[in-house]
Image (cartoon, helix red, strand yellow):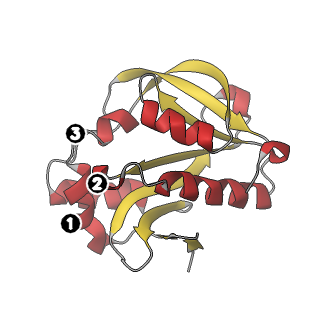
Amino acid sequence: MNIVETERLILRPWREDDAADLYKYARDPRVGPSAGWAVHKDEADSLNILRTVLMVDNTWAVTIKGSDEPVGSIGYFPCREEQANGAPEIGYWIAVPFWGNGYIPEAVRALIARCFSEGAPSVWCAHFEGNDKSRRVIEKSGFKYQFTAPYTGSDGVGHQSLCYRILPEEFEP
């Protein structure tokens, strides 16, 4: 099974039976729009997102040790930006009740280490202009700002995306 463990977290594959928990957190308008996706309308919407977006390789449910409840998501995929030359980009979100606990920086560091162990020449991460919480995660994780580019989320809304990169020699696990 494809599980990533950190000091306080278990990153595990998403499952269809996570739909109710996903909906509980993904219906909050403070979460999805700042990550480029629409607020979930109902549990069926969350189940569809599980099946079509989250239940893929290199994407995990973020759970806190001692609980199997998913409270966020993290994954990596080939960066869309031409300058990245297909290097991995990490994307993430966490439910509002868990903001400010350092869970996502902990998960991001684990995925940076995984990407470099798999031979990635660099790892990328981005946030929308004005998303200071995500910017702090990215900077805490050691990424360095590279450029800003336009991006349209799956919700159809256009944004300015600030893109960051970290190289193996810059990473401190």
- Which structural element holds mark 2? helix
Q: Which residue is mark 3?
A: 29
Q: Quadrant of residue 155?
A: top left
Considering only vertical position in the picture, is 9 above or below 34?
A: below
Return the x and y of residue 139 as percentages of the image width and height: 61, 36
- Which structural element holds mark 3? loop
For the residue marked with disc 3, what is the amino acid? Pro
For the residue marked with disc 2, what is the amino acid? Pro
Q: Residue at x 74, y 35 (%)?
A: 85
CA–CA distance between discs 2 and 1? 16 Å
- Near mark 2 (Cα within 10 A), the count class, few <14, some 14-19 or many ≥20, is few
Q: Is residue 72 left or right of residue 39?
A: right
Of tags 2 and 1, which is closer to the observer? 2
Q: Is residue 56 visible?
A: no
Q: Which residue is mark 2?
A: 97
Return the x and y of residue 1 as percentages of the image width and height: 56, 80
Counting residues from the N terminus, which is met first, the one under dot 2 or under dot 1? 1
Label disc, if present, on residue 20 of the rendered structure: 1
Q: Quadrant of the C terminus?
A: bottom right
Q: Is residue 143 visible?
A: yes
CA–CA distance between discs 2 and 3? 13 Å
Q: Is residue 51 left or right of residue 21?
A: right
- Which structural element holds mark 1? helix
